[in-house]
Image: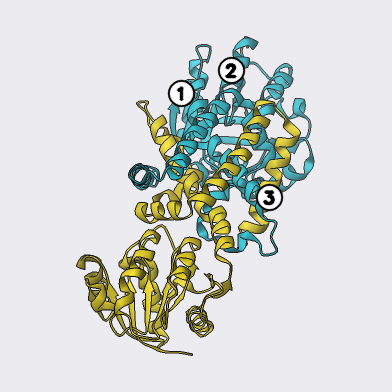
Chain colours: A cyan, B yellow
Amino acid sequence: MTVFKKVAIIGVGLIGGSLALAAREIGVFNYIIGIGRTPNNIQKAKALGVIDDYSVDLAQGVNDADLVIIATPVCTIIPLIEEMLPYLKKGAIITDVGSVKEKIINRVDRLNLSEIYFVGGHPIAGTEKSGAEAAFAGLFKGKKCCLTPSKQTNAAALKKITDLWTAVGSEVILMESTAHDRTLGAVSHLPHVIAFSLVNFLKNMDQSSKSIFDFSAGGLKDITRIAASHPVMWHDITLMNRTQLVDIIESYQEELNSFKNLIRMKDSNRLVKKMEEARNTQRNIIQKT
Amino acid sequence: MTVFKKVAIIGVGLIGGSLALAAREIGVFNYIIGIGRTPNNIQKAKALGVIDDYSVDLAQGVNDADLVIIATPVCTIIPLIEEMLPYLKKGAIITDVGSVKEKIINRVDRLNLSEIYFVGGHPIAGTEKSGAEAAFAGLFKGKKCCLTPSKQTNAAALKKITDLWTAVGSEVILMESTAHDRTLGAVSHLPHVIAFSLVNFLKNMDQSSKSIFDFSAGGLKDITRIAASHPVMWHDITLMNRTQLVDIIESYQEELNSFKNLIRMKDSNRLVKKMEEARNTQRNIIQKT
């Protein structure tokens, strides 16, 4: 497979840093330059051996790069692509790891890039941790990575990015970007919105002298774990997938409301049936993913 | 502390079975009889050494018991108390482990028991597992146990049940039953309703050829884990705490709705602020409980 001689990674956090470690481990990236707005995190990334060198200057960092990986919050991806274009060499490939794809793909298609190739990607991996110090080479092993080509996507560039993710252990899935955003909106963005809201709701309720959190058990820790996710990253995801996500939240609100009404109406049969269905789905499908 | 010579446990599942194991380990229960409607689970409990003997007959099982522990789904507790009263010896103590308390306490108060003492309890411990085979002696160590005495509760009986839970390693908290149900409604019952609804919502959305669950990561497993909880047990809890729980769900619906509207209105500042608040509460309070 293609070995990328010079790779620029913008945003050396959990995802960008882990991809650097994984690709270097298997010899697919020769030289990695990390790019950040401020030196703090990328100095740490260099000290940790995640990258070879770093730059706070985008133009300088992407200069002569064969591959540019954008691993910053999703709202920054389009501006970064537009800003870096004048400095890229012919034949450079840009890819990203953003959790929302439709707006990015559509915007890049409208740019009508010439001799610069963009491939939209989204590795489905991550934890609620963030930063270069959370990066590890095994993050993508056994995970799925969505690539969302459009009609304009260059086939050779798509092949190279497919090979890269396959090489670091991921199963690559090609999806249309709108379908991607709808699916991830449901299984990832909605759960985050629910968790953020639940934590804030409980905190606001917690006005008594004895904290209500003193009475919580392991269940509350698990259901709220993703509420500790990175605020700016998730702000960007919710806004970039705004239209579909609002629709999805509203559909969930209907489900929650009908469940509440079963309780209100003491509809025992349907309550038990809904709980049994949820248990079966959780045990037989979700637990096994 | 008081050693109970004969203890009858109705419902030898995770909670009833674990209390049997824990109390026997420290010599506080001399003889334990398990009572169940059908022999299946209690035969298993006897074979596992959780109980000394078993009965499917309530009158026979509670005969001569010093302590009766009701560890069955909460809707069955009041009927069981009423049914067993004629067969109890004078001085017997009844306690329960139900997750909802107000209706039970109010009903028992209206019974005006004479020389039979009831103490309402709720150990805050458990997993999504159920059945005697899930029981283990350490379940209550370091956990909280709420006892919800009313004005009619006998002080000596309350002391004995307090000592029992303390002896198996729990921190006993005395609460008024309405406050208990409101607190647990928020930190436990609401999260279960949210998890059941989320799983069913996603399952119903999952109509495409490629399952949307193929795109979920660890976050979805965690947030839905409690949706695998026991359907009948949770049916009972939601109905026994119906009035307060419906109120709590509605308040949560308002929070979720206002979060959705921040996304819809692209209110970046307030979105980030809400996510930061949720992250801080999750990390600094919930994770540390």
Closest to the observer: B179 or A27?
A: B179
Q: Percent position (x, y) of residue B100?
A: 48, 60
Using the numbered discs, state the Cα–Cα distance from disc 1 to disc 2 in whole angstroms: 18 Å
Using the numbered discs, state the Cα–Cα distance from disc 2 to disc 3 in whole angstroms: 48 Å
Query: Which corner quadrant of the image does residue A76 belong to?
Result: top right
To which chain does the residue with label 1 belong?
A: A
Q: Percent position (x, y) of residue B172?
A: 56, 75
Badge 1 or badge 2: first in the primary sequence: 2
Contact between labelled residues 2 and 1, with CB atoms less than 8 Å apart? no
Q: Which residue is mark 1?
A: A175
Q: Which residue is mark 2?
A: A117
Mark 1: amino acid: Met
Q: Nearer the viewer, mark 2 or mark 3?
A: 3
Mark 2: amino acid: Tyr
- Residue A204's disc is 3
SS type, badge 3: helix
In this rendering, the answer to whether A286 lies above or below A116 is below
Disc 1: CA contacts within 10 A as few (<14), some (14-19) or many (>=20): some
In this rendering, the answer to whether A45 lies above or below A175 is below
Q: Percent position (x, y) of residue B283?
A: 65, 54
Using the numbered discs, state the Cα–Cα distance from disc 1 to disc 3 in whole angstroms: 40 Å
Badge 1 or badge 3: first in the primary sequence: 1
Q: Residue at x 31, y 67 (%)?
A: B133
Badge 2 or badge 3: first in the primary sequence: 2
